Image (cartoon, coloured by chain):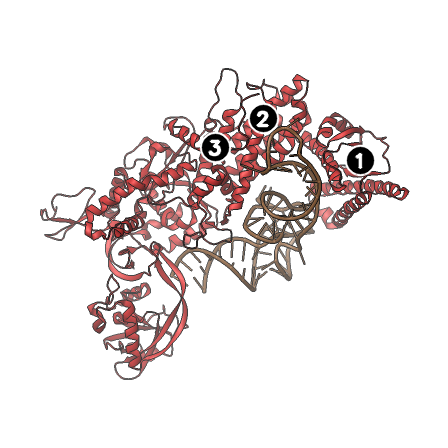
Chain colours: A red, B brown
Amino acid sequence: MADTLPKGYEPHDVEARWCKHWEEDKTFTPDPDAPGEPYSIVIPPPNVTGALHIGHALNVTLIDVLCRHARQKGKNVLWVPGTDHAGIATQNVVERALAKEGKGRKDLGREAFVDRVWEWREDYGHRILDQIRALGASVDWSRLRFTMDAGLSAAVRKVFVQLYNEDLIYKGDYIINWCSRCHTALADDEVEHEQSRGKLWKVRYLLKDGSGSITIATTRPETIPGDTAICVHPEDERYAHMVGKTALVPVLGREIPVIADAYVDREFGTGALKVTPSHDHNDWMLGKKHDLLFIQAIDENGIMKAEAGIYEGLTKEACREKIVADIEAAGQLEGIEELDHAVGHCYRCHTVVEPHVSTQWFVAATKMAPAARDAVPGMTRILPENWLKTYNHWLDNIRDWCISRQIWWGHRIPAWTCEACSHLIVAEEAPDVCPHCGSASLKQDEDVLDTWFSSALWPFSTMGWPEDTKDLQRWYPTSVLVTGFDILFFWVARMMMMGIHFMGKPPFADVYLHALVRDASGRKMSKSTGNVINPLEMIDKYGCDSLRFTLTAFAAMGRDIRLSEDRIEGYRHFVNKLWNAARFALMNLPEEAPAQVDLASIQGLHHQWLLHRLETVKQEMDQALTDYRFNDAAQLGYKFLWNEFCDWYLELIKPDMYSEDEQRKAAAQYVLWVALRETLLLLHPIMPFVTAEVWAALPVSAGEKATDLARELYPALRPACVRPAEAANMELIQGVIVAVRTIKAELGISPAHRVSLLLHPVDAVQQNLLEENRDLMTTLARLDELTVGADVAAPKASASAVIEGCQVIVPLRGAVDLNGELVRLDKELTKLEKDIVGINMKLSNESFVSRAPADVVERERERAGKLLDAKAKLEALRARFAEALNEE
RNA sequence: GGGCAGUUAGCUCAGUUGGUUGAGCACCGCCCUUACAAGGCGGGGGCCACAGGUUCAAGUCCUGUACUGCCCA
């Protein structure tokens, strides 16, 4: 007997040990010169200050499954790990820490503050990485990257300068989304819209010529001081006569024109709207189109400016109250309505964003989008396919991307202004003098770049670009990007644009978008809701493999994942099952690897069946992972190991193991050893730890050492072991065994109680089959006597069943509930009857017989025959039984 | 307002090309059978949201309705 394992699986030590081993052994550090088809994935970099949440756990697990599987298939696999500097988020975290010391970032000054963030990163940046380690991620730690590394920062500057020189980056005035708390511009997609209850004020604007008035509806009366027009629909008869006239801004009395534009929705509000180009996106557009004045009434802190006249110095909230009151006092308030509308919030701090006009840097995304669009699906596939439409729609309607942020933590924009001549210099390195006037008085732009700008370069910047590295040659483009659909626009589309522009090829062959993990009732997990499932806590309670298996089993394409803790607990049982199957094997295997047996010619129906099933599962699992059908892969492994290998095969070989016949025992040992090893290989990508541990414990040939499962190849197919006929024969034997068990259970006979069994086969072939496999039935059905023959004399008082035409008869002795058997038979007959009626309807249907494919019709006929046969036999048996009952 | 999903067992979800609906948990029996009680064996439970259509055949394809969720404006 080989080494024994502890009785229950204890994940903690095992996981820690393997993590350490794989890292020290550099198991996952690939050599670009090594053979094998290249396979590469870059990790979606988590925020350096972040903590692992369940979404990371899902993402990392799925990538790891793919990478481990690809290695098994002999590919040269690179998985690049790294973190993101996450500008606004990280700055917020450090500012909060400073606030506890009673300081603000301005107290420190820019340089000291940025130093402080770097310190923070030194102290806490490893946390998220350790958490990724704990998930068993087979990343190459030697290639760890950070978006603010020197190399990646150089890539950022080079990209910026080149795009600027190509007119794909420009500086300009634009209305942007302003977060007055973060004090920075936000990109359009960094604004989250939420439905909320608001008010709609109806305000009457008087016409200057005294010919009347026009009433508009607004949700934001505080912007009235910034009004520069009234707009109506050109075909709106109510207002047609007013177009071209001059209106007066309420209270302030400023003159503004009445214009017409088809943009106006005649149905909404009063059908007339006030135009405030500096404080609303749509009004901005109207302002540009109609060449209106741009008046900023609110500053970047949310305070009314001098332009707001008497409202100067008020907060925008106070201004709203006051101006509404003033309008009402003037008799120009027509009414207030309740309204549900979407309000934009900062995605980082949830402050309501304020549209704001300012000078910002932009990427001409409108020019870069078409190439990214055209690459899909020809060069890059997006999976699940239903995201393709969303991707296209977004790119078709893209606006230029605002990339400047008014914060300190991030890549500072490589642009300098000459203080002497105002010349703008954009360069990778800081210039000494102005090339235009020679002045040395140069001032660098204060802003930093949007974090997603550096993230957009991630697939090639991590591989060493702009150097022409071996890694790039070998592994760019990457094989697949695995990420959540929530960052399809933030990240994926932008990587596509940058990758195509700078590398000439899109960065991925496939994009697999996985679901969002929600709680059991479908809500998004969030700290504020208090419904988060902490992956680290789950690992601690149930082990990493349980969590990984659960996430994999849930990852069906295109669907949200509703996770609950009891599912993880449930799959822990599966990990334990594998562990105990291994314990059984170790107890029954020799010290060294069992002697090889020719599997193609092996005798024993149970071996042939198991090997056949193993071949099928090997193929199906490989295909499932190739197709990103993670849930199918997990399910296949689960069912094979538990319902076939454990429930049947291990039980079936027990007599072999206890046999005096050494040859018989040796054959069983060898098949057990092979099948368990291959099963470990199949399950390893999903649950690396328990499989590696078991693999290492299994016996190996004399003089050899146990290998590292993570370095082993996917089990080769064994065509000679594909034997569907034998597998079907085994299913007959299983059917008989189940029939006997059912009879026992339903008649209240203890499962341990041995009964006699009479089998009346349907023909000589079946008779032989049953004779040859009588031992299997005797063991698993717990029989004391088994008689097979066409002439078996069934006692009247027998329980019975029919399996594949074979009559299964269990003579009843002692105190059993005979009525129970009658009930059971009738239930069985009713079921048969129902099936027969259904199938007869089909077969008596002329058009089914003539139009359905011949093989389908044939199959149905066979089934009908079997059902009728079973029914006839069961009825006869019932009749005999009823006689016995009467004689009682 | 535009777009995309979902509706299958008590709960959470599978169901690849149309061809007798499956799993986990929960439930009900019987078993401590020397790998596993985190287990074994057996069982109950579903007009696959609703209404039409295509087809010999629809959970599966098409149309519409209802409800739920998400994204974008």
Tell me: A672 left or right of A465. Answer: right
The residue that disc 3 covers is: A689
Q: Position of residue A465 (x, y in %)?
A: 29, 37
Mark 1, residue position: A810
Q: CA distance from mark 2 to mark 3?
A: 18 Å
Of the residues under marks 1 and 2, which one precedes in the sequence?
2
Quadrant of the rendered structure where residue A876 is?
top right
Mark found first going from the N terminus, 3 or 1: 3
Q: Secondary structure at mark 1?
A: strand
**For the residue marked with disc 2, what is the amino acid?**
Ala
Residue at x-position 41% and y-position 26%: A35
Q: Where is residue A269 drawn, in percent x and y? A: 39, 73
User: What residue is shown with label 2?
Assistant: A585
Figure check: A659 above or below A10 = above
* Chain designation of label 1: A
**For mark 2, does the 10 Å Cα neighbourhood hold few (<14), some (14 to 19), or many (20 or more) residues?**
many
- Looking at the image, which residue sits at the far right? A887
